[in-house]
Amino acid sequence: MTGEFATNDNTAGAGSGSGSGPGAGETDGPDQLEFAALLCSRVCHDVISPVGAIVNGLEVLEEEEDQEMREHALILIAKSALQASAKLQFARLAFGASGSAGAHIEIADARRAAEGLMEGGRITLAWDTKPAALHKTRLKLLMNLLQFATGAVPRGGELNIIVENGNEGMVIVATGPRARIPEHSNLAEGDKFDGLPDSRAIQPYLIGLLGKQLDASLKVEQAMEEGPVTFAISYGPNATVDDGMIG
């Protein structure tokens, strides 16, 4: 992953160390090892809860003789396994799509992964997508922005995901009670790095890196208090990545 960012001088925040050595003073971000460690921490944080629930359910099956308790344990195991699978499938697209075959990924695949991630939760997704596929780096940007946008509706609500053709951009509108601009949105918008982010900040930081690589800019806005929060991606003149064929 870090090698991908190192191909562009503007995105060297993930490809160069922030300490001594070549490039020192030229970047504003964690070095490669710090970035990798924080990203892994983020993925582990997302999957540890359902995996732990599976372990607990298996322990109940091993120790409990009451049939009703065993049935509850089986339900817990099945539900948690589905949650863990959904989180991993989403993470594969959001963080690991660089190694996938081909330059484009179907939006239908992203939609299934995102809806699996949200299943059983308090956030619903509405899709308005024109291209059938996106370049894998653009898809990574969309997936990370989608997950980041859930922080705008902590009490639940709706995310309306709009993907235009070519370089027309992408928009996510988050609507719900007590809506707010998520923490660390300045990093997602590409602000200069100021101190090592924790695992909660690594996703918006990654969004900023992906935006720089794609010559894309993000604007997070909320017109009124607790009103809808808009996450708008626009592409600059050097955005040359092509999307997939329109379905």
Image: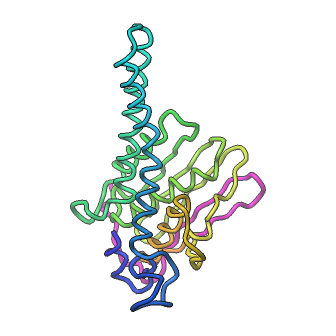
Residue 137 location in percent, x, y? 36, 67
Q: Can you say whether 65 is above or below 60 in the image?
A: above
Q: Nearer the viewer, residue 209 or 19?
A: 19
Magenta-drawn stretch contains 119: no
Left or right side of 133 for 20 = right
Q: Residue 2 is drawn in which quadrant?
A: bottom left
Residue at figure coordinates x 35%, y 80% from the top left:
6
Quarter of the image containing the N terminus? Answer: bottom left
Q: Main secondary structure of the magenta part?
A: loop
Asked whether 221 falls inside the magenta stretch, the response is: yes
The colour scheme used to paint the residues is rainbow
User: Measured from the top left, where is residue 163 in percent x and y?
Assistant: 46, 59
Q: Is residue 55 placed above or below 95 in the rendered structure?
A: above
- Lateral position of residue 48 relative to residue 224, left or right: left
Looking at the image, which residue is at 44% across and 84% down?
10
Nearest to the observer: residue 48 or residue 232: 48
Q: Looking at the image, which residue sits at the far front?
A: 63
Quadrant housing residue 238: bottom left
User: Residue 133 in the image: x percent, y percent?
Assistant: 33, 58
Q: How many marks?
A: 0
Which of these two is toward me, 185 or 16?
A: 16
Residue lying at 54% horizontally and 40% vertically, measured from the top left: 124
Quadrant containing the C terminus is bottom left
Where is residue 125 shown, x and y percent of the image?
52, 44
The residue at 61%/64% (across/down) is: 184
User: In the rendered structure, which segment of residues is drawn in magenta?
Assistant: 219-247
